[in-house]
Structures are given as C-alpha cells and as structure tokens.
Image: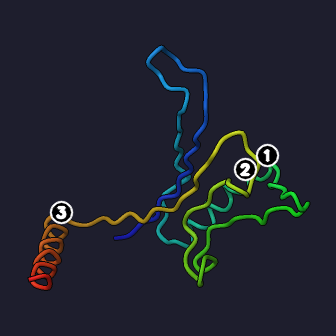
Amino acid sequence: MKKHLVTIEYRYKRIPKSDIDCEHTSKTITIGVFDGFHEACIHGNDALEALEARFSLHRYPSGKYAKKERFSLNGGCFGSKVSLVTNLAYLKTPFNFFAKITELIHEDIDSCVDGILDEVKEYRKKIE
C-alpha cells in the first residue's frame, strides 16, 4: 500500500540555548498523509500558497519576478514529477525551506526482505 507524506522542513539560525548548542537548527512539520500523489500535490500547494501570502516572490536583478513553484505530476524536467520545492530563487524568506512529498510504502516485512534477497541474487548472478 502506498501513501504520500507532505512535509516542510525549515532551516534557520537562532540564538543557541546552551554553550554546546548550535545556532543552526531545523524544524519539520507534517502537512498530511494522503492516498494519492495528486491529493498530496493539492494540499502541498495549499501550504505553498500560505507561504506566498506571507512572503514576496524573489525579484531578479532584471526586475522580473520568480515564477511560483508548485508540486505536480508532470511539471518537472521532461514531464517528470515535482515532489520537492525550495524557497531558493522563489520566495524571499529569512529562512530556507524544503517542501517535499515522500512516498510511503507499507509492506509486510517478510515479503520486503524476500524481495530484497531476490534482487541481491539477481545482481550477484549478473556480476559473476
């Protein structure tokens, strides 16, 4: 069974909480777990729109604004999936963020291990 997890990881600097603490930190939030990639795109894009409501689009030196980034089934290079969106050259934020859709596969552990062993055997046969 496949599900799709939508998360946003924020990376930023903050005042260290102790002498051994680091000023770089990250915080990841879960937008939701969805049955299909299309549904995950819809909810992920809603989260991106919420960020766009708070922060402006990046403006290039030419004066042109960056295009809005979106999750999609076929909007990437050569019609591929877009399952990762970052704020780099997209939104002007005081932090970095990485919005991503991860495929979750629920499988019985025995059948998973059996499949891995079969693939290892095939690989060993090929390289011998």
Residue at the image point whose x is 46% and y is 62% from the top: 102
Q: Which disc, if any, is residue 54?
A: 1
Secondary element under disc 3, as helix, strand or loop, is: helix
Distance, label 2 to label 1, CA atoms, is 5 Å
CA neighbours of label 2 inside 10 A, class few (<14), some (14 to 19), many (20+): some
In primary-sequence order, the first of circles 1 and 3 is: 1
Circles 2 and 1, Cβ within 8 Å, touching? The answer is yes
User: Where residue 12 sits in the image (x, y, percent)?
Assistant: 61, 36
Secondary element under disc 2, as helix, strand or loop, is: helix
Amino acid found under the numbered disc labelled 2? Leu
- Residue linked to disc 2: 51
Residue at the image point whose x is 52% and y is 43% from the top: 28
In primary-sequence order, the first of circles 2 and 3 is: 2
Quadrant containing the N terminus is: bottom left
CA neighbours of label 1 inside 10 A, class few (<14), some (14 to 19), many (20+): few
- Residue linked to disc 3: 109
Distance, label 2 to label 3, CA atoms, is 39 Å
Q: Is residue 38 above or below residue 90?
A: below
User: Where residue 85 sits in the image (x, y, percent)?
Assistant: 61, 60
Query: In this rendering, would 7 be left or right of 108?
Result: right
